[in-house]
Every structure is written in C-alpha cells, then in structure tokens.
Amino acid sequence: MAELIRARKLSAREVMQAHLARIEHENPRVNAIVTLAAEQAMADALLADEWQAQGQLLGPLHGLPVVFKDLVDTAGMRTTYGSPIFKDHIPAADAIHVARIKAAGAIGLGKTNTPEFGAGSQTFNTVFGATKNPHDVTKTCGGSSGGSAVALACGMVPLADGTDHGGSLRNPAAFCGVVGLRVSPGRVPEAVTGTTNLSVNGPMARNVQDTALLLSIMAEEDFSGDLARDFKGVRVAWFKDMGGIPFERPILDAVNAQRRVFEDLGCIVEEAEPDWTDVWESYDTLRAWGFAARNAENVRRHGDLVKDTIHWEVERGLRLSEADFVRANAQRAAAIQRCADFLKTYEYFIAPTTQVLPFDVNQPYPMEVAGVKMKTYVDWQKSCMLISCLETPAISVPCAPMIGLQIVGRHRDEWSVLQLAHAFTAATPSG
C-alpha cells in the first residue's frame, strides 16, 4: 500500500476513505477503536497528497493510517489509559515512538481500547466497555493491546502499536490471528513508565513483513529487508511444559502439530527448555513493585474509580521492601544469564503463546486452566510472562484459528526472530 501511494497509483485520501469506511462497518460490532479523529485524519491525508504533488520527501509510511493504543500519549488526541480518572485527558505531547511513526509519514486516526491501566489480558474498562473477538464476538480478544489486534484483524488499519508487559502484544495477537512482537528492552522507547524494564513497546500487523516495517520506524533501525533465510541445521528448542504450567489440550495439539513445519524448513528440533527456577517469583515481585510505583497515587486519590485488581497489585507492591526488590532483580539477572547460555546451544525456543483459547467476553479472566485453578487474575498468562522476564524478543504468529505460536530468540536479535516467523508463516496456511 505504501509503495502504491509513492507510485501515485493510490492517493492517501483514497486509502484513508477506504479505512474509515471499514471502521464505520466493523467497529460497532467489535468496539476496537474508542477515539476516532476522522475529520483530522482526512485533512492530514489531503495534506499528504499535496506534499507528494509538490515533490516533498516522503517517509516510508507516507499516507498510511495507523491507530495507537490508548495506553500511550498522543498529542491533541484523547488518551484515557482505560481509566475513568483520565476519561477526558488530552496529552500535550506524543510518546516517542508515536512521534517517530508520525514523522515517517503515517497518519494517526484514533486510539484503540485497552484494559484499565493495561492490567490484565482481557480488554474491557468502565469508560468504553469490552472489545470483542472479531472471529467470535462472544469471546475476548485478549489484551492489553486487544483494540489494536482487533483493528488489524478487521482491516480497519494496516498497522498498529502495542505494549507488552506480560503478554499484552502476544496474547491478543494469538486470539485475533495477527502478529505481535515483544522486543528486547531498550529496542523501542518504553511506553509505560515504572521502575522496571518489563514493559516494552512493539509493533503489530497482519503479517511478519509489515511487523518488521513498523519495527524499523519505532526502533529507528532497519528491519525492513529481505527476511528470507536458509534454516538448514539451525537448532530449535521445543517446549515441554514450561516448568509445569497447564495448557488446554487444543492449544497443545495445535502448536505441537507445527513441529513438522520447522523440521521441513531444515531445523533440528529438540525438546528442551530454559531453567525456569525463580523466574515466576522474580516477575511477580517486579510486576507488583512496578504497579505500585505507577498507580499508588491514583489509588490513594481516586480509589473508588480504580478496579479491584489494580488495588490488589498496588497493595502487594507497597508491602514489598527494597530487599525484596533487590532479590527479584538478582533472580532475574540469574535467569537472563541462564537463558543466554541456553540460547548458545539453541538459536530459538518455541512454545504456545497462550495457555487457553479465547474465553467469554463477560468473564474477567479464566478461573482455571485444564482443570488447574488459577490463584490470581494473571496466572493464566505465564506462558508469556515467563518469557517477559528474560529480556529476549518473542513474536506470536498464527498457527490455528485463535491460537498463536511463540518464537523466542536471543537477546536483541529481533531480525533473526522475524526471519523464522516469516519462514513459518510462509509455509503454513495461516500465513
């Protein structure tokens, strides 16, 4: 689409009109885009065409419509963070990655729904309600980047951003059948402030190539080249049980059926896993600490407007000591080193993205997985959360309807992860 615009076979106005028509048709069904700046977007598209007619230098995303998650700041456009506290909040400045995307020529046309302050992998809040899975509107789309995933799956936009703390890019990508890339910390400016680097910002798209294109803009590094690669002899570690966490049988069956695809690509696939010792304890502690750092003041001042799971996160975070924080970071450092050593033997680790299929959109979170009761509202996301602690890039790609496969690579080796994801999707019907 970007190439067609540059070649003047499409105008930015035509592209914007087509996407706005798609939003008008699809969004009432799924509630993905919660703030829409249609008039401004059309005005910006007209300006983009005028610049092109005048021979202005065009960015790589010139004229493409994009949406931004309602958890990240957009200058002059309402940003609520999914909270009634900020239901009328309009930021004065763009988040860094938002500014980069706009500078590349993309046109921001709206904001996508997110759970309150991004807490939980079910996209609903009291400001805008729930976002529904486009493949089955009785089911959740996941989260917390659920609005972005749904907007992509419905063809409302070609590109969208997301954030990922414990799976917020990967979970909704899996549930909605799109691609979501969790980058290594530091690759893209952090979207959510806090005292840990567990939260990262990353790209989402309908295919791997478009994901790589958007990453190039967000990271200001080139990931948009030819992703083709020979994988003959590349060693791949195939998950066993990720430390004993439960998975629903359809998830296991769908992901395990893909093993032959990697073998057909030439990979040497062996069952092996990183050492998960203390990884969950570290993540859980750092998560609570970060929530307290970011939201304690909101709870103190507007407690009646904050949902109960955030109260719980903040309360347990405030009970932690500095010694707890130091210990969690030491556990994480040890886990990162063990994972790095593991990935000297294997170039990739492959596992399911989610532990469950999409559940009822009116259910806040699964109470059990494969007969195992969940202790908290986030325990069912461990297949992503464990990876978040390791500072490795991880991409979710579709492998069956509403089921994602997670490809994990070496620290800061997003390029290699994109290459294998590209090869896998090219070799499968879901791609």
Image (tube, rainbow, N blue to C red):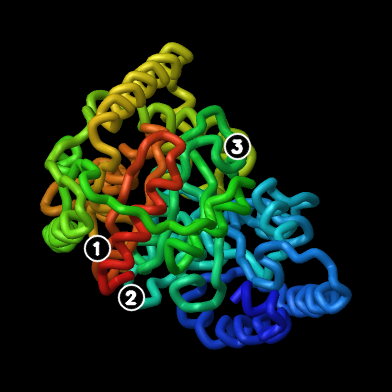
Q: Is residue 42 above or below residue 120?
A: below
Q: Earlier in the sequence, mark 1 or mark 2?
A: 2
Q: Position of residue 265 (x, y in %)?
A: 22, 57
The kind of residue on which mark 1 rests is: Leu
At 39% from the left edge and 37% from the top edge, which residue is drawn? 392
Q: Secondary structure at mark 1?
A: loop
Q: Nearer the viewer, residue 427 or 129?
A: 427
37 displayed left or right of 144: right
Q: Of marks 1 and 3, which one's residue comes earlier in the chain? A: 3
Q: Residue 193: which numbered mark, if any? A: 3
Q: Which residue is mark 2?
A: 138
Q: Residue at coordinates 85% horizontally, 72% vertically from top-left?
A: 55
Residue positioned 47% across, 44% down in the render: 183
| Res 362 seen here | no
Marks 1 and 3, how far apart in space?
31 Å
Residue under numbered circle 1: 357
Seen in the image, is 82 located left or right of residue 79? left
Q: Nearer the viewer, mark 3 or mark 2?
A: 3
Residue 182 position within the rendered picture, expressed as x and y whole percent measured from the top left: 44, 47
Quadrant housing the N terminus: bottom right
The answer to which of 328 and 22 lies nearer the viewer is 22
